[in-house]
Image: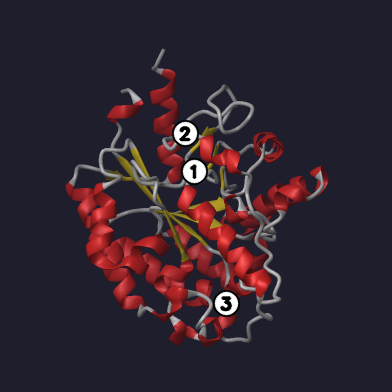
Amino acid sequence: MPLESLRLCAVSVDLDEIPNYHAIHGLPAPQSPGATAVHDVALDRLDALAERAGLPLTLFAVGASLSREQSAQSLRRMADHGHEIANHSLDHFYDLTRRTADEMRRQIEHGADVIERAVGRRPIGFRSPGYVITDELMDVLIASGHKYDSSVFPCPAYFATKAAKLTMIAVRGRRSRSVQDHPRVLLSPTRPYRPGKPYYRQGDLPLIELPVQVTRGARLPYIGTTLTLSGSRTASLLTKMVLGEPVINLELHGMDVLDSRDGLQALIGHQPDVDIDHGRKVNVLEGVFAQIRKSGYRFVTLQQAATEVERALSSQP
Ligand SMILES: [Zn+2]
Protein backbone atom coordinates (compact mmCIF):
# COMPACT_ATOMS: atom_id res chain seq x y z
CA MET A 1 0.00 0.00 0.00
CA PRO A 2 1.48 3.37 -0.96
CA LEU A 3 2.10 5.94 1.76
CA GLU A 4 -0.75 8.15 0.51
CA SER A 5 -3.29 5.40 1.19
CA LEU A 6 -2.42 4.98 4.88
CA ARG A 7 -4.87 6.39 7.42
CA LEU A 8 -3.09 6.08 10.75
CA CYS A 9 -3.23 8.29 13.82
CA ALA A 10 -0.64 8.03 16.59
CA VAL A 11 -1.11 9.96 19.82
CA SER A 12 2.12 10.47 21.72
CA VAL A 13 2.82 12.18 25.02
CA ASP A 14 6.10 13.76 26.07
CA LEU A 15 6.52 13.15 29.78
CA ASP A 16 8.53 16.29 30.54
CA GLU A 17 8.23 16.61 34.32
CA ILE A 18 7.29 19.94 35.95
CA PRO A 19 10.90 21.12 36.58
CA ASN A 20 11.33 21.20 32.76
CA TYR A 21 8.56 23.80 32.51
CA HIS A 22 10.22 25.87 35.21
CA ALA A 23 13.47 25.65 33.23
CA ILE A 24 11.78 26.83 30.00
CA HIS A 25 10.36 29.89 31.74
CA GLY A 26 13.55 30.56 33.67
CA LEU A 27 11.80 29.98 37.03
CA PRO A 28 13.37 28.49 40.18
CA ALA A 29 12.89 24.73 40.75
CA PRO A 30 9.32 23.74 41.75
CA GLN A 31 8.30 22.59 45.23
CA SER A 32 6.53 19.30 45.90
CA PRO A 33 3.88 17.93 45.63
CA GLY A 34 3.39 19.49 42.16
CA ALA A 35 6.95 18.74 41.07
CA THR A 36 6.10 15.17 39.96
CA ALA A 37 2.51 15.80 38.80
CA VAL A 38 3.14 14.37 35.33
CA HIS A 39 3.96 10.90 36.68
CA ASP A 40 1.74 11.07 39.76
CA VAL A 41 -1.41 12.57 38.22
CA ALA A 42 -1.21 12.96 34.44
CA LEU A 43 -0.38 9.33 33.63
CA ASP A 44 -3.55 8.00 35.26
CA ARG A 45 -5.67 10.61 33.48
CA LEU A 46 -4.01 9.76 30.16
CA ASP A 47 -4.58 6.06 30.72
CA ALA A 48 -8.27 6.67 31.42
CA LEU A 49 -8.58 8.96 28.39
CA ALA A 50 -6.88 6.40 26.14
CA GLU A 51 -9.12 3.64 27.42
CA ARG A 52 -12.32 5.63 26.83
CA ALA A 53 -11.14 6.55 23.33
CA GLY A 54 -9.91 3.00 22.64
CA LEU A 55 -6.42 3.95 21.53
CA PRO A 56 -2.83 3.11 22.47
CA LEU A 57 -0.47 5.92 23.49
CA THR A 58 3.23 6.35 22.84
CA LEU A 59 4.89 7.83 25.90
CA PHE A 60 8.24 9.60 25.56
CA ALA A 61 9.91 9.10 28.94
CA VAL A 62 12.80 11.07 30.39
CA GLY A 63 15.31 8.68 31.98
CA ALA A 64 16.18 10.89 34.95
CA SER A 65 12.53 11.04 36.09
CA LEU A 66 12.63 7.28 36.61
CA SER A 67 15.22 7.39 39.37
CA ARG A 68 12.19 8.12 41.54
CA GLU A 69 10.66 4.73 42.25
CA GLN A 70 6.99 5.86 42.17
CA SER A 71 7.49 7.49 38.76
CA ALA A 72 9.12 4.34 37.38
CA GLN A 73 6.19 2.29 38.71
CA SER A 74 3.56 4.54 37.10
CA LEU A 75 5.35 4.25 33.79
CA ARG A 76 5.57 0.47 34.12
CA ARG A 77 1.83 0.36 34.71
CA MET A 78 1.31 2.26 31.44
CA ALA A 79 3.52 -0.22 29.60
CA ASP A 80 1.54 -3.10 31.12
CA HIS A 81 -1.65 -1.48 29.80
CA GLY A 82 -0.30 -1.73 26.24
CA HIS A 83 1.12 1.75 25.71
CA GLU A 84 4.46 2.09 23.94
CA ILE A 85 7.30 3.62 25.94
CA ALA A 86 9.84 5.57 23.88
CA ASN A 87 13.00 7.53 24.65
CA HIS A 88 12.99 11.27 25.38
CA SER A 89 16.69 11.21 26.49
CA LEU A 90 18.27 10.82 29.89
CA ASP A 91 18.16 14.38 31.24
CA HIS A 92 16.04 16.35 28.76
CA PHE A 93 18.82 18.85 28.10
CA TYR A 94 17.34 21.51 25.80
CA ASP A 95 20.84 22.02 24.37
CA LEU A 96 21.42 18.30 23.78
CA THR A 97 22.52 18.85 20.17
CA ARG A 98 25.17 21.34 21.30
CA ARG A 99 26.84 18.89 23.68
CA THR A 100 29.86 16.71 22.85
CA ALA A 101 29.44 13.51 20.86
CA ASP A 102 30.17 11.45 23.98
CA GLU A 103 27.55 13.26 26.00
CA MET A 104 24.95 12.90 23.23
CA ARG A 105 25.63 9.17 23.14
CA ARG A 106 25.34 8.93 26.91
CA GLN A 107 22.05 10.84 26.87
CA ILE A 108 20.52 8.51 24.28
CA GLU A 109 21.95 5.16 25.39
CA HIS A 110 21.70 5.67 29.11
CA GLY A 111 18.19 7.06 28.61
CA ALA A 112 17.26 3.82 26.82
CA ASP A 113 18.94 1.73 29.57
CA VAL A 114 16.99 3.40 32.34
CA ILE A 115 13.68 3.05 30.47
CA GLU A 116 14.40 -0.61 29.74
CA ARG A 117 15.11 -1.24 33.40
CA ALA A 118 11.85 0.46 34.42
CA VAL A 119 9.46 -1.14 31.92
CA GLY A 120 11.26 -4.30 30.81
CA ARG A 121 11.53 -3.41 27.14
CA ARG A 122 14.14 -1.35 25.27
CA PRO A 123 12.69 1.70 23.48
CA ILE A 124 13.10 1.91 19.71
CA GLY A 125 11.67 5.40 19.20
CA PHE A 126 13.15 8.75 20.09
CA ARG A 127 12.02 12.35 20.41
CA SER A 128 14.53 15.09 21.10
CA PRO A 129 13.95 17.65 23.87
CA GLY A 130 12.56 20.83 22.26
CA TYR A 131 12.28 19.18 18.79
CA VAL A 132 15.92 20.00 17.95
CA ILE A 133 17.64 17.31 15.88
CA THR A 134 20.91 17.21 13.92
CA ASP A 135 22.66 14.77 11.59
CA GLU A 136 25.05 13.93 14.39
CA LEU A 137 22.21 13.03 16.74
CA MET A 138 20.58 10.92 14.00
CA ASP A 139 23.80 8.90 13.77
CA VAL A 140 23.75 8.32 17.52
CA LEU A 141 20.13 7.12 17.29
CA ILE A 142 20.94 4.65 14.54
CA ALA A 143 24.05 3.33 16.32
CA SER A 144 22.01 2.77 19.50
CA GLY A 145 19.34 0.71 17.73
CA HIS A 146 16.49 3.22 17.41
CA LYS A 147 14.13 2.49 14.53
CA TYR A 148 12.31 5.79 14.32
CA ASP A 149 12.69 9.40 15.31
CA SER A 150 9.87 11.87 15.87
CA SER A 151 11.66 15.17 16.52
CA VAL A 152 11.27 17.10 13.28
CA PHE A 153 8.67 19.85 13.63
CA PRO A 154 8.48 21.76 10.34
CA CYS A 155 6.32 24.51 11.75
CA PRO A 156 7.06 28.17 10.92
CA ALA A 157 4.53 29.43 13.51
CA TYR A 158 6.15 27.44 16.31
CA PHE A 159 9.53 28.62 15.15
CA ALA A 160 8.49 32.27 15.23
CA THR A 161 6.68 31.94 18.57
CA LYS A 162 9.65 30.23 20.17
CA ALA A 163 12.01 32.95 18.94
CA ALA A 164 9.64 35.64 20.27
CA LYS A 165 9.25 33.87 23.60
CA LEU A 166 12.99 33.40 24.06
CA THR A 167 13.45 37.09 23.33
CA MET A 168 10.76 38.10 25.85
CA ILE A 169 12.27 35.91 28.55
CA ALA A 170 15.72 37.40 27.89
CA VAL A 171 14.31 40.95 27.92
CA ARG A 172 12.80 40.27 31.35
CA GLY A 173 16.28 39.36 32.56
CA ARG A 174 15.65 35.64 32.97
CA ARG A 175 17.43 32.90 31.11
CA SER A 176 15.52 30.14 29.36
CA ARG A 177 17.14 26.74 28.93
CA SER A 178 15.35 26.35 25.62
CA VAL A 179 17.45 26.64 22.45
CA GLN A 180 16.44 27.74 18.98
CA ASP A 181 16.54 25.20 16.18
CA HIS A 182 18.08 26.04 12.84
CA PRO A 183 15.44 27.23 10.32
CA ARG A 184 16.57 24.46 7.93
CA VAL A 185 14.17 22.16 9.79
CA LEU A 186 11.42 24.09 8.00
CA LEU A 187 12.61 22.53 4.72
CA SER A 188 11.88 18.98 5.84
CA PRO A 189 8.88 16.97 4.61
CA THR A 190 5.72 17.24 6.69
CA ARG A 191 4.81 13.59 6.05
CA PRO A 192 6.74 10.55 7.34
CA TYR A 193 9.93 9.88 5.38
CA ARG A 194 13.21 8.06 5.38
CA PRO A 195 15.79 10.72 6.13
CA GLY A 196 19.17 11.11 4.47
CA LYS A 197 21.96 13.57 5.01
CA PRO A 198 21.06 16.26 5.78
CA TYR A 199 18.24 14.84 7.89
CA TYR A 200 15.67 17.25 6.45
CA ARG A 201 16.02 15.66 3.02
CA GLN A 202 14.80 12.21 2.00
CA GLY A 203 17.51 9.57 1.80
CA ASP A 204 18.41 6.07 2.87
CA LEU A 205 19.23 6.14 6.59
CA PRO A 206 18.07 2.98 8.40
CA LEU A 207 15.32 4.67 10.39
CA ILE A 208 12.01 6.43 9.78
CA GLU A 209 11.30 10.06 10.62
CA LEU A 210 7.76 10.75 11.79
CA PRO A 211 7.47 14.56 11.86
CA VAL A 212 5.34 16.16 14.56
CA GLN A 213 2.06 17.15 12.90
CA VAL A 214 1.43 20.45 11.17
CA THR A 215 -1.67 21.38 9.20
CA ARG A 216 -1.78 21.51 5.43
CA GLY A 217 -1.34 24.95 3.94
CA ALA A 218 -0.11 27.31 6.63
CA ARG A 219 1.58 24.46 8.52
CA LEU A 220 0.05 25.47 11.84
CA PRO A 221 1.11 23.42 14.85
CA TYR A 222 -1.27 20.47 15.35
CA ILE A 223 -0.23 19.56 18.89
CA GLY A 224 -1.99 19.22 22.24
CA THR A 225 -1.21 22.72 23.46
CA THR A 226 -2.64 24.35 20.33
CA LEU A 227 -5.80 22.24 20.50
CA THR A 228 -6.49 22.72 24.22
CA LEU A 229 -5.74 26.46 24.10
CA SER A 230 -7.99 27.04 21.11
CA GLY A 231 -11.03 25.09 22.40
CA SER A 232 -13.36 22.56 20.76
CA ARG A 233 -14.58 24.62 17.77
CA THR A 234 -11.16 25.74 16.57
CA ALA A 235 -9.67 22.33 17.39
CA SER A 236 -12.25 20.78 15.08
CA LEU A 237 -11.33 23.21 12.28
CA LEU A 238 -7.63 22.47 12.76
CA THR A 239 -8.41 18.75 12.65
CA LYS A 240 -10.10 19.20 9.25
CA MET A 241 -6.77 20.64 8.07
CA VAL A 242 -4.94 17.37 8.87
CA LEU A 243 -7.61 14.84 7.84
CA GLY A 244 -6.49 13.13 4.66
CA GLU A 245 -2.85 13.03 5.71
CA PRO A 246 -1.52 9.43 5.65
CA VAL A 247 -0.31 9.66 9.25
CA ILE A 248 -1.57 12.08 11.89
CA ASN A 249 1.20 12.31 14.48
CA LEU A 250 -0.48 14.13 17.35
CA GLU A 251 1.93 15.11 20.10
CA LEU A 252 0.67 15.85 23.59
CA HIS A 253 2.39 16.69 26.86
CA GLY A 254 1.52 15.61 30.39
CA MET A 255 0.54 19.26 30.87
CA ASP A 256 -2.41 18.76 28.50
CA VAL A 257 -4.27 16.87 31.24
CA LEU A 258 -3.11 18.95 34.23
CA ASP A 259 -4.06 22.37 35.58
CA SER A 260 -2.89 24.78 38.27
CA ARG A 261 -4.85 22.92 40.96
CA ASP A 262 -2.53 19.96 40.56
CA GLY A 263 0.08 21.86 42.55
CA LEU A 264 1.21 23.98 39.60
CA GLN A 265 0.33 27.46 40.92
CA ALA A 266 3.90 28.64 40.33
CA LEU A 267 3.35 28.32 36.56
CA ILE A 268 0.34 30.68 36.48
CA GLY A 269 1.21 33.66 34.30
CA HIS A 270 3.99 31.74 32.55
CA GLN A 271 2.39 28.61 31.10
CA PRO A 272 -0.93 29.74 29.51
CA ASP A 273 -2.62 26.31 29.39
CA VAL A 274 -2.15 25.72 33.13
CA ASP A 275 -5.15 28.04 33.71
CA ILE A 276 -7.52 25.83 31.74
CA ASP A 277 -9.39 23.20 33.73
CA HIS A 278 -8.00 19.76 32.93
CA GLY A 279 -11.51 18.37 32.37
CA ARG A 280 -12.09 20.92 29.64
CA LYS A 281 -8.79 20.07 27.96
CA VAL A 282 -9.61 16.36 28.06
CA ASN A 283 -12.99 17.11 26.43
CA VAL A 284 -11.32 18.93 23.56
CA LEU A 285 -8.95 16.01 23.02
CA GLU A 286 -11.74 13.43 23.13
CA GLY A 287 -13.67 15.42 20.53
CA VAL A 288 -10.63 15.46 18.27
CA PHE A 289 -10.03 11.72 18.64
CA ALA A 290 -13.68 11.01 17.77
CA GLN A 291 -13.51 13.27 14.72
CA ILE A 292 -10.35 11.53 13.48
CA ARG A 293 -11.78 8.06 14.06
CA LYS A 294 -15.00 8.96 12.25
CA SER A 295 -12.91 9.88 9.23
CA GLY A 296 -11.66 6.31 8.93
CA TYR A 297 -8.37 6.47 10.80
CA ARG A 298 -6.88 3.60 12.78
CA PHE A 299 -5.13 4.51 16.04
CA VAL A 300 -1.69 2.97 16.45
CA THR A 301 1.51 3.47 18.43
CA LEU A 302 4.33 5.36 16.73
CA GLN A 303 6.23 2.08 16.52
CA GLN A 304 3.37 0.56 14.50
CA ALA A 305 3.14 3.71 12.39
CA ALA A 306 6.89 3.52 11.65
CA THR A 307 6.58 -0.14 10.61
CA GLU A 308 3.68 0.56 8.24
CA VAL A 309 5.38 3.65 6.82
CA GLU A 310 8.56 1.66 6.21
CA ARG A 311 6.58 -1.01 4.39
CA ALA A 312 4.78 1.62 2.31
CA LEU A 313 8.00 3.42 1.40
CA SER A 314 9.79 0.25 0.36
CA SER A 315 6.90 -0.76 -1.93
CA GLN A 316 7.27 2.54 -3.77
CA PRO A 317 9.72 2.95 -6.64
ZN1 LIG B 1 10.19 17.31 26.16
**Location of residue 66 in the rendering, given as x and y in whole percent from the top left corner:** 63, 66
Q: Is residue 293 left or right of residue 79?
A: left
Q: Nearer the viewer, residue 120 or 98?
A: 98
Residue drawn at the location 33% of the way across and 41% of the way down: 216
Which residue does the numbered mark 2 point to in the structure image?
189
Real-space Cα distance between discs 1 and 3? 30 Å
Give residue 62's quadrant in the image: bottom right
Q: Image check: 146 left or right of 305?
A: right
Is residue 202 in sight in this rendering?
yes
Badge 1 vs badge 2, beta-carbon distance below 8 Å? yes
Residue under label 1: 154
Extreme-top residue of the structure: 317
Q: Residue at x 39, y 45 (%)?
A: 219
**Up-down: is 76 above or below 192?**
below
Q: Secondary structure at mark 2?
A: loop
Amino acid beneath label 2: Pro
> Separation of disc 1 and disc 2 at Cα?
7 Å
Q: Earlier in the sequence, mark 3 or mark 2?
A: 3
Q: Nearer the viewer, mark 1 or mark 3?
A: 1
Q: Tell me if mark 3 has few (under 14), some (14-19) or many (20+) residues whose alpha carbon lies within 10 angstroms of its own.
A: many
Tag 1's secondary structure? loop
Question: Where residue 120 appears, x then y in whole percent?
Answer: 58, 53
- Give the answer, above or below, for where 132 lies relative to 210: below
For badge 3, the amino acid type reads Thr
